[in-house]
Amino acid sequence: MATKIRLQRGGRKGYAFYRIVIADARAPRDGKFTEKIGTYNPNTNPATVDLNFERALYWVETGAQPTDTVRNILSREGVYLMKHLRGGVKKGAFDEATAQKKFDAWKADKQKGLEKIAAEEAKAKKDAAAKELAAEKKINEEIAKKVAEKKAAVEAAKAEEEAAKAAEAAAAEAPAEEAPAAAETETAAAE
């Protein structure tokens, strides 16, 4: 039986989620499988892989052929590197401890790279948020300035209106005061 390491689709429409399975090469994509060795979620950034490393290594060493996507996943997780290092141990190039040291060094270096990328993404996100906040503050200041100008115009109009009313009231009072004075003048002239 030719075995394949392949992805088996799950999840809802528009949100794919895959199981990494060992299956007969003739079985359909979502059909019968021998063993589930992990999961792959491409919807997260970076993609999330949960892999049973030992079982994946066992199946790769026994000759199971992975699909292209699964080969990339296994390579990123270090399964092919460990297979290569175990081959070196079998040939006598180095011992098991040296192979494990090399693998651990590779894993640590890879983890540093991932942390660096995550830090850069977080910094870029923070900078973008700061830029957006500055732009929003500028817009808010402009809006506040326009509102203040509008309020000042309304206050000036009210002040003009009150001044006009005061002038009208003063003008109305002045003729009323002049009328009694004029009447007194007329009575004095009549006498």
Image: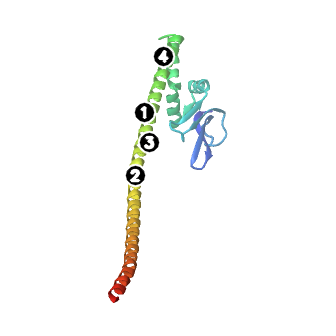
Q: Quadrant of residue 52?
A: top right
In the rendered view, would you say 51 is above or below 131?
above
Secondary structure at numbered mark 4: helix
Sooner in the amino-acid sequence: mark 4 or mark 1:
4
The amino acid pointed to by label 3 is Ala
Mark with earlier residue (3, 1): 1
What residue type is disc 1 on?
Glu
**Residue named by callout 1:** 120
Pointer 2 local density, CA inside 10 Å: few below 14, some 14–19, many at least 20: few
**Image depth: mark 4 or mark 1 in front:** 1
User: Which of the marked residues, 4 or 3, is nearer the chain's N terminus?
Assistant: 4
Q: CA distance from mark 3 to mark 1?
A: 14 Å
Cα separation between marks 4 and 1: 27 Å
Which residue has dot 4 on it?
102
Q: Nearer the viewer, mark 2 or mark 1?
A: 2
| Marks 2 and 1, how far apart at CA | 28 Å
